[in-house]
Image: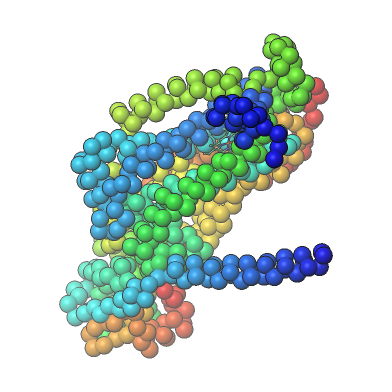
Amino acid sequence: MSTRRNFMGMALGGFTALGAVGGLYAAKRTWEPLPSVKAAGFTTIDLSEAKAGELVTEKWRGKPIFVLKKTDDMPYHDRDVVIGSDRYLITVGLCTHLGCIPAYNSSDKMFNCACHGGKFDVSGINLPGLPPSFPLDIPPFRIEGTKLVLGEKGTEYNKMLADKLTRKV
Amino acid sequence: MAKFDEKAKPFSKQWLDDRLAITTVMKVLNIEYWIPKNINFLWAMGMILAATFGMLVISGIFLLMYYVPTVEGAFDSVNYTIMTEVGYGWLWRHIHGVGASLVFLIIYIHLFTGIYYGSYKRGREMIWLSGMLLFVLFSAEAFSGYMLPWGQMSYWAGMVITNLFAGGSLEATGFVEWIRGDYVPAQAFLGRFFMLHVLLLPLVIIGGIGFHFATLRLPHVNNQDGEEIDFEASAKLWKEGKKKESQVIPFHPVFLSKDVFIMGIYFILFFYLVFYNFEFAMDPVNFDPADGLKTPAHIYPEWYFLWSYEILRPFPTDLGLIAFGIAQVIFLALPFLDRSPNVAPASRRGLFKFWFWALLLDVLVLTFMGKLPPQGIWNTIGFIAAVMFFVLWVALPFITKLEKKIEE
Ligand code: HEM
Ligand code: FES
């Protein structure tokens, strides 16, 4: 008797577990970004219009993108996007601490985050001893003449990633 | 079929008893659920919480009829339709906002009352754990509700809080995008938080309240002296009519009538705030529609999250996250970190007395600092208070171990 009940219990338990796993997987998939959201993840921006020393904010995947054409007195960094003789800071405009938008202050040439006091220099490098522990993220980009396609990974971007100059976003 | 009275009139007491045992149920849950006499108004906080939750549910039902859960429609449906067009729409919104704020004020009073009187140990551990579960659930409920008007604070609070789940150096950005259903908070995000706020979390909270009540039934509530009452003997005295000699009163109708009186006073305050002083519950920054390209100059959470926010703020990302994570769960461990055998008010417990007031003060300091901008001296005070928080919890097992047993 008891073996028959055990068998029934195990069979029932097995199917229930299977159903639960399937249900959880479906729930996980339902919670994922839609294909249309993912497909819209590419934006082309034109750099030829940018004026040196003036911050322009573009939008990619709903996130602000900082574009700053560097002036001659702004130091070079391997993170710069170089097109001809022009150097640009291109980063996601969200603080790497918890995601507020740092404000650019052109007099002290700093990005200041109001949320928890983070600071980044004109190459997007975080100042030590403050909440953010990483430089501003560089979005995946591919250079096309004077344009950048954001969301696509070009050789320059892959090199920066390999050199650990930025994190994956 | 069990025996039942053929002649009982339908729906009479006897008739219902034969079918539902209502007398027995009422006895177990109400008439013979014994409450010590030796308690004060602080023991009314639990029922006040239950009543406030009721107010939130009722006002929420009315808000739900005109609220539109889309990124295009949400802001106007709240700030325009409900506030200016719907008859008495403002009333539901004020009740909901004020209720959400007060529920946390009362939860904190309830929680610190429990700590002060030692109501979390020696048989009452499950009461404490289920209470903390309610605290976590209410926090999630408040956060998800805050997203719904889709103002600037909704958006940026949503951005910052979901970013916590990237786990700093773990760089789990994929997980964050999964939570949001998008790269940034957008329609998918609003839709799922809407569902959580109006359906799933309230259901779980109702279950949680039922569980919390169940955990109270066997150990009974504590009393002002932490005295171990012989509930059976005292109940016997009461039932024999020796009400003076008995140390207990029945939950219904005696305790409830006292509860209802205190609730009356509470609701005078509640409705005073709803009608004349509701601004504190409505952040002005959230009256600007959400804008993903502009962070408000100064971001801070609602007052009841400030203390834990301030624990996150002064540290670098990873350390901040770890500190924040521990702060969220450390209260759960209280019954196990307190090593003293005494159940007594903090004032009679030696060093624990100082520990209690230091913890309360520290949480208050953290709360005030969390609201101030991260500059100069505020940074230093916030940092010291955050470190103090951990020092206190680490010290707890040691100071309670030293505590002498109170002889009766
Ligand atoms: C909305 C949420 C809550 C509701 C509706 C609620 C309700 C109640 C009620 C009705 C009581 C009995 C009466 C009293 O002693 O006040 C009680 C007792 C208690 N609650 Fe809660 N509670 C909630 C949240 C919490 C939280 C967050 C904690 C802390 C972790 C907590 C810890 C306790 C403890 C320790 C007792 C026993 C008090 C004693 O024995 O003297 N509760 N609760
Ligand atoms: S989000 Fe910028 S410092 Fe925290």
At a point 49% along the width and 45% down the height, the residue shown is: B138
Q: Position of residue B139 (x, y in %)?
A: 48, 47
Q: Does any portion of residue B231 appear in the rendered image? A: yes
Quarter of the picture for ligand 1?
A: top right
Q: Does any portion of residue B380 appear in the rendered image? A: no
Which residue reaches farthest front?
A: B7
Of residue B227 and residue B402, the one placed in the foreground of this image is: B227
Horizontally, residue A81 falls left or right of residue B36, namely left
| Quadrant for the C terminus of chain B in the image | top right
Q: Residue B117: which quarter of the image?
A: top right
Horizontally, residue B230 falls left or right of residue B301, namely right
At a point 33% along the width and 78% down the height, the residue shown is: A39
Measured along the vertical axis of the image, is residue A12 above or below residue B262?
Answer: below
Q: Position of residue A9 (x, y in %)?
A: 72, 65
Horizontally, residue B279 falls left or right of residue A132, namely left
Q: Residue B378: which quarter of the image?
A: top left
Of residue B17 and residue B362, the one placed in the foreground of this image is: B17
At a point 67% along the width and 67% down the height, the residue shown is: A12
